[in-house]
Image: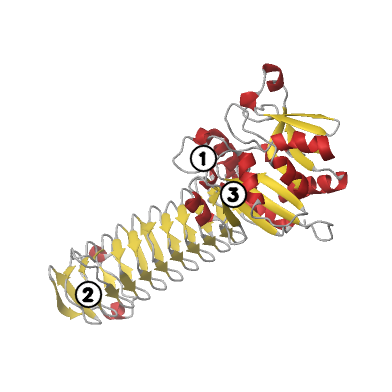
């Protein structure tokens, strides 16, 4: 929705300065994430489609940390001392020199609010021609929220901590979203006082003041799901459950199969291609990108990992890795940052790979650690192959060229190069380069003859004792 064509400009303020004491956290409430995104950024994302002239975010508690997560189009405004929502809006008004316009005020702890609802609130405000409009909802459990009464253009909100027993039985609640005419708000904000149990300046007090001058009205929320504000860990979990379901539904509508949505967690930033199947117990997080026709899971956890078309990742963990087309991973593999698996390659059961390129059709089938290595095409590492990449001071690289083969329980002490088509016997300890096409065995490994002719092309029949296991 856009405010194009409106008589007065739109400005928006997100209140994100509070500590959030009920979260029982060392972190500011708005920094808590839902599906990988800080809570405050969901609110900003809902405001953005309205195209405000400026989008301000009032910061206070842990201001630098909050500033660090804000998108570029959000302007932080500092509230040096957290003296309540009224003071926060007063600080924001000081950053808006314009005399006329509409100010949309949104709490930063409502991550489920939609741009549709904000647009409808704004339309209600403008069409009614009033000084203030507040979003309200009648909730089955109003605990912790201010109670709303409306009478002849005057809206009164009583915070729960200050409410009487009779007022607490009222289930019409304030959701912390408002539209104000700037001139009315500027006048009213000067008249509120900290005469309440918390000694704070409540923004809600301006509604009654404005109502007596130029009327205030309510707008009732249509989708009560959006009323899930976050004040404690239980509410955080409830809101994340709703957002997670929305994300999964969006992927499924685009052609992704999710076998068990209840056990599948996909963050908001993840991309998945059509005809990919996500199996139970899978976590996809950060900048993860999944191509088409992949199978991910079960019980797979990928962070900032790229999986290209047709790849399979089963019971495995990926961190900053790239898995090429048709590659297979797992079960129980760990791909650490810098790992690149080329097309058709394989990292099998109980393998750890770090900062390594595994070439096209090459295999690290199982029980191996490969770190800081370059593996060419059509190479095969036997079970238990280890790259000893760290000498206690520095890390060194291992190069395994095209078509090379290592027998089971081989140790490669870097820096070392295994030449093209070379062949290492089971149990070898390699501390010197092995020339192309040679067979080496022993500890330390020594060249004894040419490798089998097929080994030099990467297609030798392997003796059973030296196979991948």
Can residue 251 be seen?
Answer: no
Mark 2 in CB contact with mark 3 (< 8 angstroms)? no
Labels 2, 3: front one:
3
- Residue 461 percent coordinates (x, y): 30, 72
The residue beneath circle 1 is: 19
**What color scheme is it?**
secondary structure
Q: Residue at x 56, y 64 (%)?
A: 291
The residue beneath circle 2 is: 416
Q: Report the side of 395 relative to 305 (left or right).
A: left
- Residue 24 percent coordinates (x, y): 47, 34
Q: Earlier in the sequence, mark 2 or mark 1?
A: 1
Mark 2, Cα crowd under 10 Å, few <14 / some 14-19 / many 20+, is many
Labels 2, 1: front one:
1
The residue beneath circle 3 is: 58
Q: Looking at the image, is 367 positioned above or below residue 448?
A: above
- Residue 398 percent coordinates (x, y): 27, 72
Q: Indicate the secondary structure of the residue bearing disc 2.
A: strand
Q: Earlier in the sequence, mark 2 or mark 3?
A: 3
């Amino acid at each position: 929705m856009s405010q194009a064509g409106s008589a007065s400009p739109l400005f928006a303020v997100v209140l994100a300065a509070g500590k959030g004491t009920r979260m029982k956290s060392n972190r500011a409430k708005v920094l808590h994430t839902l599906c990988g995104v800080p809570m405050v950024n969901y609110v900003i994302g809902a405001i953005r489609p309205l195209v405000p002239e400026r989008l301000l975010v009032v910061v206070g508690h842990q201001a630098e940390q909050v500033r660090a997560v804000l998108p570029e189009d959000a302007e932080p405004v500092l509230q040096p001392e957290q003296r309540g929502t009224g003071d926060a809006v007063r600080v924001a008004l000081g950053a808006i020199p314009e005399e006329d316009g509409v100010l949309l005020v949104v709490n930063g702890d409502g991550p489920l609010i939609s741009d549709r609802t904000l647009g409808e609130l704004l339309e209600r405000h403008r069409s009614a021609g009033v000084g203030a409009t507040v979003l309200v909802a009648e909730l089955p459990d109003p605990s912790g929220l201010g109670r709303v009464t409306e009478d002849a253009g005057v809206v009164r909100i009583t915070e729960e901590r200050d409410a009487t027993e009779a007022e607490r039985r009222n289930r019409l609640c304030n959701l912390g979203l408002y539209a104000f005419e700037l001139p009315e708000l500027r006048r009213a904000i000067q008249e509120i006082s900290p005469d309440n149990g918390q000694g704070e300046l409540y923004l809600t007090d301006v509604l009654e003041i404005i109502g007596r001058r130029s009327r205030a009205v309510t707008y009732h929320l249509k989708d009560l799901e959006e009323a899930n504000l976050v004040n404690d860990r239980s509410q955080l979990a409830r809101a994340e459950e709703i957002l997670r379901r929305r994300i999964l539904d969006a992927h499924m509508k685009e052609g992704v199969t999710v076998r068990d949505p209840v056990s599948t967690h996909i963050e908001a930033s993840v991309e998945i291609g059509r005809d990919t199947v996500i199996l139970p117990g899978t976590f996809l997080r950060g900048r993860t990108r999944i191509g088409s026709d992949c199978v991910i899971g079960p019980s797979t956890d990928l962070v900032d990992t790229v999986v290209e078309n047709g790849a399979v990742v089963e019971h495995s963990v990926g961190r900053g890795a790239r898995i090429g087309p048709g590659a297979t991973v797992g079960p129980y593999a760990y791909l650490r940052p810098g790992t690149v698996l080329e097309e058709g390659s394989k990292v099998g059961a109980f393998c750890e790979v770090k900062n390594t390129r595994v070439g096209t059709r090459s295999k690290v089938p199982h029980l191996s650690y490969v770190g800081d290595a370059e593996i060419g095409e059509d190479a095969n590492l036997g079970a238990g192959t280890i790259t000893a990449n760290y000498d206690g001071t520095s890390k060194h690289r291992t190069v395994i060229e095209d078509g090379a083969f290592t027998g089971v329980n081989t140790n490669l002490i870097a820096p070392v190069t295994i030449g093209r088509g070379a062949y290492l016997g089971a149990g070898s300890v390699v501390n010197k380069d092995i020339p192309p096409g040679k067979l080496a065995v022993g500890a330390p490994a020594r060249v004894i003859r040419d490798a089998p002719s097929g080994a030099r092309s990467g297609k030798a029949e392997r003796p059973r004792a030296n196979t991948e296991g």
